[in-house]
Amino acid sequence: MSLLLTFLLASFCLKTSYCIDFDPLGYILYCPCMGRFGNQADHFLGALGFSKALNRTLVLPPWIEYRYGERRSTQVPFDTYFKVEPLREFHKVVTMEAFMEEVAPIEWPPDKRVAFCYSPRGPKDVESCNAKEGNPFGPFWDTFNVDFVASEFYGPLHYDVTNKDNLDRWKGTYKPSEWPVLAFTGSPASFPVSEENVPLQKHLKWSNRIEQQADEFVRTKLPKGAFVGIHLRNGPDWTRACDHIPESPNLFAAPQCLGYRNEKGVATRDMCLPSKELIIRQLKRTIKGLSQSGLGKEALKMIHECLETRVRFLGEVKAVFVASDSNHMLEVLRDGLRRMNVTAVRREEEVSSPHVDLAILGRARHFIGNCVSSFTAFVKRERDAKGFPSTFWGFPAEKKAKRHEEL
């Protein structure tokens, strides 16, 4: 090691409370440039699995958010919403901020920054990834003052690293000694998250701030007893997307309930955009079923391990917590559930954080979500990891006799 490198490493260690070990097997960076949080979370799990297979350190990108009235996206540091240490127990990770400050000057200097993409992006006569073209691509890289000097097209390689031949080609083509950093213009992962990467959700743990806000809401805003959490997608954009269900039976996150090969059926309009009547019927049926059954073994285990969970799970269902992208339907729900002595509640903050909503839904006695939504998929994966029950609107399809019964 040169004297200069030794001096630089010593300087980094003095600036921070720890010293970052440079990874001789290299790093993976990417822009989470598709969709909002639900889609980005799916892509993150895939990127984590991809990095693990290549045994490169994953640089944790900020979450990209689009705020009302702002033309450019906002980049929110990864650890604002999730803890880093639980991920490190599974694989090597470093935040983007720490990487750019402490690793990039040595391993990824400005004259070595190459953008990776499958094939040229943008004008057909330009052989370039155009990695910073458009929003959120430009704002994402500008946040870290990154400009690219060249493009690298990795096609026909693909992200399925369960295929050993493909994995060996990645390792052989892009040796860490020659390519210490692979910086992708988009996530090196498929959407929705591939089946083999779904279990990686268990390594995503909410930050203390999100946990505290969720706990505070449950303690102070929900009546004592258990509660059911529901997710309603019903905004105008979503309504238009549901119009494509007939020709897109595996739309968006539908594999989470239909299976990755549609082995459990195909998507229906009721699953994508359930009617008010269906929502009330299914909620009544769920609440009635919970009052007549005990808790499963896994849920009981969690109750004994966590005092907070005891408050959320035990007792009769007294409330329905609603998370929605548009219409929370509170009055409809309250009216429909009045005879059951169950109320409907949402978070009323001026700027409601969807992440806190997600954390609250993860604490419910039972969760009902939208099969097609990646927002629902995040909750479903988290609850599956804890052994908590979840179901979907309109799935499986109601039997005709059930549709007209009085609950």
Image: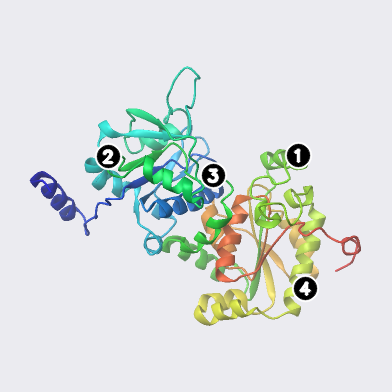
Distance between the alpha carbons at the discs numbered 3 and 1? 24 Å
**Circle nearer the viewer, 3 or 1:** 1
Which residue does the numbered mark 4 point to in the structure image?
Answer: 288
Query: Could you tell me residue 40's position as x and y percent?
Result: 51, 47
Q: Amino acid at mark 1?
A: Glu
Looking at the rendered image, the quarter that the C terminus falls into is bottom right
Quarter where residue 154 is shown: top left
Find numbered disc 3 in the image and state the secondary structure of the residue it sits on.
loop
Distance between the alpha carbons at the discs numbered 1 and 4? 36 Å
The type of colouring in the image is rainbow
**Circle nearer the viewer, 1 or 4:** 1
Distance between the alpha carbons at the discs numbered 3 and 2? 28 Å
Q: Amino acid at mark 2?
A: Trp
Q: Callout 2 environment at 10 Å: few (<14), some (14 to 19), or many (20+)?
A: some
Which residue does the numbered mark 1 point to in the structure image?
Answer: 247
Find numbered disc 1 in the image and state the secondary structure of the residue it sits on.
helix
Find numbered disc 4 in the image and state the secondary structure of the residue it sits on.
helix
Q: Amino acid at mark 3?
A: Arg
Residue at image coords 54%, 71%: 219
- Asked if disc 2 and disc 4 are in contact, CB closer than 8 Å, the reply is no
Pick the front one: 193 or 314: 193
Which residue does the numbered mark 3 point to in the structure image?
Answer: 36
Which residue does the numbered mark 2 point to in the structure image?
Answer: 108
